[in-house]
Each structure stands twice: as C-alpha cells, then as structure tokens.
Image (spheres, rainbow, N blue to C red):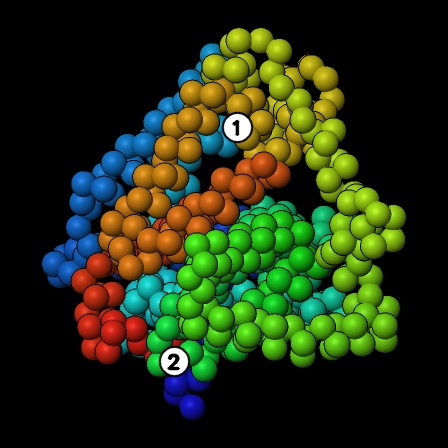
Amino acid sequence: MWKLIKILLAGIAVSFYFFPFEFTFLPGVNTKMAMAGVGLVLYALDLAKGRAPQINKEGFQIAVIAALVSLCGLASVIINNTNDYTYATYIVSMFVWLGGAYTAVKIVQWLHGYVSVELICNYLIGVCVGQCVLALMIDSIPAFKAIVDRYVVGFDFVDTDALNKANRMYGIGAGLDVAGTRFATVLVMIAFMIQRLSGSRFYQYIWLYLVAFIFIGLVGNMMARTTTVGVIVALVYWIISSGIFNKSLQKDNVRVWKYLVGALCVAIPVIVYLYSANQQFHDNVRFAFEGFFSIAETGKWETNSNNILKNMIIFPDNLKTWLIGDGYIENPYHRDPYYVGPKWHGYYMSTDIGYLRFIFYFGLIGLAIFVAYFFKVAKTCVYRFPKYATLFWLVLAINMIVWLKVATDIFLVFAIFLCMSKEDNEEYENKYENSLSDPLDI
C-alpha cells in the first residue's frame, strides 16, 4: 500500500511541475512557481549541509547563454521602444523551471531512496498517461468537469474558459500545443526506453510501454495535434535503429516491431468500435486525425490548422527586423496601451510559427543564440548521462521541429535531468546487471 501511495505522491509532484496550473483560491501563483520557491529553500539547505549539486562549468555556460538570450530581448525592447518583456526575462524563467525541477527530483528521491534517468522517464510517462485519462474524464463526465473548472482557473499559458470556448479537450494543466509538445517529448522517451528494453532481460515490459505510446498518441492528438510530431519522430527512430537500411536487422529490433504490430491489432478494433458507438469519441478522433480522414475522403491532406499555418508565413520586410527584431512577440494591441499600429489577429504579425515569432521579437541574432542555448543544454545532459545521449538528441529534435508550428520550448524536460547528479544515476545503475534496472521496479 505504501508503495502505491509514494508512487501517487511522487507522480502528483512531477505533474505539478510538468503541467503547472493555478487554483482559483490562489490566483497568480501556479504550481511551478510554488515548487520553485520550495526548491530554492531545499537547495539552500542542501548547500548548507554540503550535499547540493555544485554549479559546474557547463551549468555556468548555460546560465551565460540564457542571459544573452534575455539581453537580446531587452535590447530589442529598448531599441524598438516596446513593453513586451516576454523573453527579456528568460533567464528568470530558466531558474524558475530549475527550481521547480529540483523540488520534483528531491521528492522522487525522498520517496524512493534513489533517483535515476529511467525512474524520471517512467514518472513523466505515467504523468502524461494520467493527463490523458483526466482529459477523457473531463470531456465525458460533466460533474467531474465542473469540479475541475471550479478549482482550476488556468494553466501556465491559457485559462480554462478559453479552452471551453474553443471546445478543446484538456487535462489539469495540460492543453493545446504546449501539452502536445510535452506529449511529443514523452513519446520519444517511450521509444528510447523500448529500444533499450528490447535487448535486455526485461523485454516482456515492452508491451506496457507500447500501450502507453498508443494511448498518449491517440488521446494526446485529441488534445493537441502537435503530439503527432512525437509519434513520427519515434517511428523514424525505430526504423533507423532497426538496421534495416544496412541490411543488419537484429532479433531485438524485430521483437520491437512484433510487439508494436500486436498492440495495434488489439488497439485498432477497440478504437474502431468506440468511433462507431460513441459520438463524442467519434468527433475527437476526427479532430485528432483530420489530415488522415481528409486523405481517405478527398485524396488530399487538409487540416484546418495547416491551412491557418500557411497564412502565417510572413517574413520581415526590413534589415533591422531581420537582425534585432521589432520587440514584439505577443499581440501589442492587447498588451501595449500606447500601441497605435495594425490590429493583428492572434500574435504579433498574425503568426504563430515559432521561428518567425522569435525573429520578429529579437531577430536572427537572438534566434541564433536561443538555438545555441538549447544545443548547449542538450549537450550538457548528454555529457552527464552518456548512455542516454540518443534520448536527449531526440528531445532536442522535438523542440526544433515544433518551432515550425508554435513558439514553445521544452527546457523543462531538460531541467529535470539537469537537477540530477551523474553519481546518483550511476550508483543506481551499477547495482543491476548490464547497467539496466527493472523499469517497473519503482
């Protein structure tokens, strides 16, 4: 019983960090901010006891690059005389995420007596499965939805009223493309974990990870079709790592595909039945896979979001904007009382495309530094946990691909691993044969 309780408590802590939200009785403070405050105290106590992770060369370099990102944002705001400080304060956001991540890691470590990369991955996977379950419950049980809407006023990026008006599915802190991006990163985590398990003595657990993969891929797309990025990257990773291109297909890789086909043989009939029997599920599936339905019914790939995205491709028309931006990333019509320019729809210049929003905010100079920042963060994680190098590069790929659609980053995924020490992970792994622990022994 205690084992289940500690898993639940640790899962709630990780969810509060990974999918932050505000309570109606505590407006202005979301769960991430609260955990960051606790993290600051915990770090100070650990520092006093000599047990806190030391700020090494890599950590200092990450902070310096984040400061440069903020400096580019601040320079653009000052030069353009705007008041949009969204990324001018990015270094503060970085430390808030790190503070929240430190709290989440410490809670997991206290409850389990250890912490490892695989354990954190399992919690992130479990949290995303839980959010998908919550989203289905909120969407199909009016009484439960009423309770959630009564006590959860908003997420880290949007309020529940906006989600209800848009008729979009949501969990508790999970919704729209922000949730889709995080689901996508977790899907590549699952893909990596399955690949590791395929050659271990615990390969029988592959089916459980595949169930999670299919479930998040399905429900996640109902909430945000950005989840598809994770599905595609995971499948490409499995194909490339299978050795099929160099004609060296291994038994372990064949096992992965056999399990995947078997899981789909079970899942597809269930999905088809629910699609036919439940109108609400029917509508959600059509939204999730609108492009595929379009191909089947019209022979062309068409989705409402893709058509909107095409109209968002707009480039700067002057050198200054290309270099340092216009100092706007949000819609100035709603944020700047002194703005008298065009009334844009949505964000500045009516574009939601990440790369373009960054260029319009702090130009190619700021964008280049921002990209370098994420490469440095990923490289630091790779250096600290070399056995998981592929995982961190896959997460970075998700970030770079998603920017083709929206301006949201996934530093929070890296942050939780940056708050772990290499020694803690190695100490745990070395207790098990072949440095691979039972993935479900939590």
Q: Nearer the viewer, residue 213 or 347?
A: 213
Q: Position of residue 325 (x, y in %)?
A: 52, 18
Q: Is residue 84 above or below residue 157?
A: above
Identify the residue position indicated by label 1 in the image.
358
Q: Position of residue 111 (x, y in %)?
A: 33, 76
State the residue at coordinates (79%, 72%). 272
How many C-alpha atoms fall within 10 Å of the one at disc 1: few (<14), some, or many (≥20)?
many
Identify the residue position indicated by label 2 in the image.
202
Q: Quadrant of residue 192?
A: bottom left
Separation of marks 2 and 1 at Cα, in angstroms = 44 Å
Image quarter in which the N terminus is found: bottom left
Q: Is residue 327 something that shows in the picture? A: no
Q: Nearer the viewer, residue 206 or 128?
A: 206
Image quarter in which the C terminus is found: bottom left
Q: Position of residue 57 (x, y in %)?
A: 18, 41
Q: Amino acid at mark 2?
A: Phe
Q: Amino acid at mark 1?
A: Phe
Question: Is 94 placed left or right of 398 in the picture?
Answer: left
Q: Nearer the viewer, residue 13 or 355?
A: 355
Q: Which mark is residue 223?
A: none
State the residue at coordinates (58%, 50%). 229
Q: Is residue 367 above or below residue 248?
A: above
Q: How many marks?
A: 2
Q: Position of residue 280 (x, y in %)?
A: 82, 67
Question: Is 396 placed left or right of 139 in the picture?
Answer: left
State the residue at coordinates (38%, 42%). 94
Q: Nearer the viewer, residue 387 or 344?
A: 387
